Image (tube, rainbow, N blue to C red):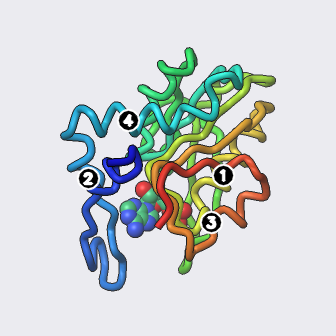
Amino acid sequence: MSREELLRKRIRDVPDFPEPGIVFKDITPLLQDREALELACELLAEPYVDARVDLVVGIESRGFIFGPPVALRLGAGFAPVRKQGKLPWRTVQQSYALEYGEDVVELHEDAVTPGQRVLIVDDLIATGGTAVATAQLVRKMGALVIGKSFLIELGALNGRGKLHTSDVHAVLTY
Ligand code: AMP
C-alpha cells in the first residue's frame, strides 16, 4: 500500500455535516492510528525540512492538531490562529468574506515577530478563504509566509488559486 493510500483509508466522508450538501472529511480515524498519524505529520512537514521555518501557524481547530508535531519536526515554534474572541491576550485581526457575511481570524500581537519565516498548517483547504486571511495576518505582522501545508485539498473549490502563490502543499487531493 502506498503512503497516500494508507492515509486515504483513514479519512471518513460524512455527508451533510455540519449542514446539508457538505461532505465533511473526518480525520479522527487517521488520528487514532499511530502509523497514519505519524505519516500525516511527516508528509505535511516534508517539503519544508530545509526551509528554515521559525514558526508554524496553525488554523483553528484541526490546524492545532497537526501544527505542533509539524513544528517540532521542523525545529520551529507554534502559534494558534483563532476565530474572533477566543484568544486571551491582545490580538491582530483580519476579516474575510464568507458566502454570506464575513468572519474574523486573530493572532496574539506578540505571536509573530517581524522577519520570521512562517509555515501555515491546516487539515484542509476548501475555498481557501481562511488560509488567505491567515497569510494576510502573518504578513501584516511583518513576517514572511514561506509556505502553506494542508493534509487535504478539495481541488474542485480551487482554494489554491486564491492563495496567489505556488508554495501550497497538499498531501492528498480530492
Ligand atoms: P476554507 O476557508 O473554505 O478553505 O475552509 C477551510 C476550513 O474549513 C478548514 O479549517 C477546514 O478544517 C474546514 N473545512 C471546510 N470544508 C471542510 C470539509 N468538507 N471537511 C472538513 N473540514 C472542512
Q: Which mark is residue 159?
A: 3
Q: Which residue is mark 2?
A: 10
Callout 2 touching callout 1 (CB < 8 Å): no
Callout 4 touching callout 1 (CB < 8 Å): no
Distance from Cα at disc 4 to Cα at disc 1 = 32 Å
Q: Establish if 11 lies above or below 51.
A: below
Q: Mark 2 or mark 1: name the one nearer the start of the chain.
A: 2
Q: Mark 3 or mark 2: name the one nearer the start of the chain.
A: 2
Left/right of residue 55 with respect to residue 82 in the rendered view: right
Disc 4 Cβ-to-ligand 1 distance below 8 Å: no
Disc 3 Cβ-to-ligand 1 distance below 8 Å: yes
Instruction: Name the mark nearer the viewer: 1 or 3.
Output: 3
| Point 44% across, 49% down: residue | 123
Distance from Cα at disc 1 to Cα at disc 3 = 18 Å
Quadrant containing ligand 1 reads bottom left
Q: Which residue is mark 1?
A: 94
Distance from Cα at disc 4 to Cα at disc 3 = 24 Å
Instruction: Name the mark nearer the viewer: 2 or 1.
Output: 2
Q: Residues within 10 Å of mark 1 (few under 14, many from 20)?
A: many
Q: Which mark is residue 162?
A: none
Q: Residue furthest bottom?
A: 21
Between 62 and 48, which is closer to the camera in this rendering?
Answer: 48
Callout 4 touching callout 3 (CB < 8 Å): no
Distance from Cα at disc 3 to Cα at disc 2 = 23 Å
Q: Identify the amino acid type marked 4.
A: Leu
Q: Secondary structure at mark 1?
A: strand
